[in-house]
Image (spheres, coloured by chain):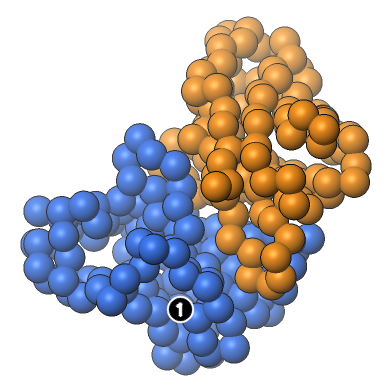
Chain colours: A blue, B orange
Amino acid sequence: EPEVTQTPSHQVTQMGQEVILRCVPISNHLYFYWYRQILGQKVEFLVSFYNNEISEKSEIFDDQFSVERPDGSNFTLKIRSTKLEDSAMYFCASSVRGLSNQPQHFGDGTRLSIL
Amino acid sequence: GEDVEQSLFLSVREGDSSVINCTYTDSSSTYLYWYKQEPGAGLQLLTYIFSNMDMKQDQRLTVLLNKKDKHLSLRIADTQTGDSAIYFCAEGGNAGNNRKLIWGLGTSLAVNP
């Protein structure tokens, strides 16, 4: 069964450094999402992406964050200057369409640890 | 604002039924979802229900929706040790495309042999 893949599974970065989290969505999916889960807290929506542009973003997704679909398969999340509070599990998801009856399928996540 | 609440822990004996409950606030939600997260793994879609349905059954899983009370439950029949995981309730509203999901904190299900 097709699945969303994320790399790396664990990323350790010094505070202030840039980090890029990578995702390969399911191949026929058109909508892409990033969520994060800080330890002990709820999964939070960050951003959704369609047709090479951001569709919606949350308050968390400030100028330090950006997303890109550099080619036909990858979808990346960049954090420019990481802060301690960026430490979290980051999940990528994709769906065929953006409608609620098209469920979002998730990757296994990247655990980001900021030192 | 939109919110989803779940109880944090549930412990059952193997073979018993598990019932995981969830409440949500967004009355415009058209779909509600259950995801499962095993240790060290990602968020696996288990099932979802359209808001005009009261019940959906899928093998050992039964989802009940009380839209009036904004209450959703997931029943797992004949619970097995392999069902031990965190179960997340999530709601997706009805405000156009690219719907973000609003999540509960997750219910940790422990299945005892």
Left or right side of B100 for A78 = left
Left or right side of A61 for A98 = right
Instruction: Judge whether residue B88 can be spotted in this image.
Output: no
Q: Position of residue A114 (x, y in %)?
A: 16, 55
Instruction: Judge whether residue B90 can be spotted in this image.
Output: yes
Q: Please name the amino acid that badge 1 sits on.
A: Phe
Circle 1: is it few (<14), some (14-19), or many (20+) Cα within 10 Å? many
Q: Quadrant of residue B98?
A: bottom right
Q: Position of residue B12 (x, y in %)?
A: 61, 10
Image quarter of the N terminus of chain A: bottom right
Residue in the foreground of this view, choosing between A71 and A17: A17
Q: Quadrant of residue A65?
A: bottom left
Q: Position of residue B2 (x, y in %)?
A: 58, 47
As displayed, is residue A62 above or below residue A86?
A: below
Q: For the residue labelled by badge 1, is the local secondary structure a helix, a strand or a loop?
A: strand
Q: Position of residue B92 (x, y in %)?
A: 67, 54
- Extreme residue in the front direction: B1
- Taking the spot 28% from the left edge, 76% from the top edge, the residue there is A63
Check disc 1 and report the residue beneath it: A75
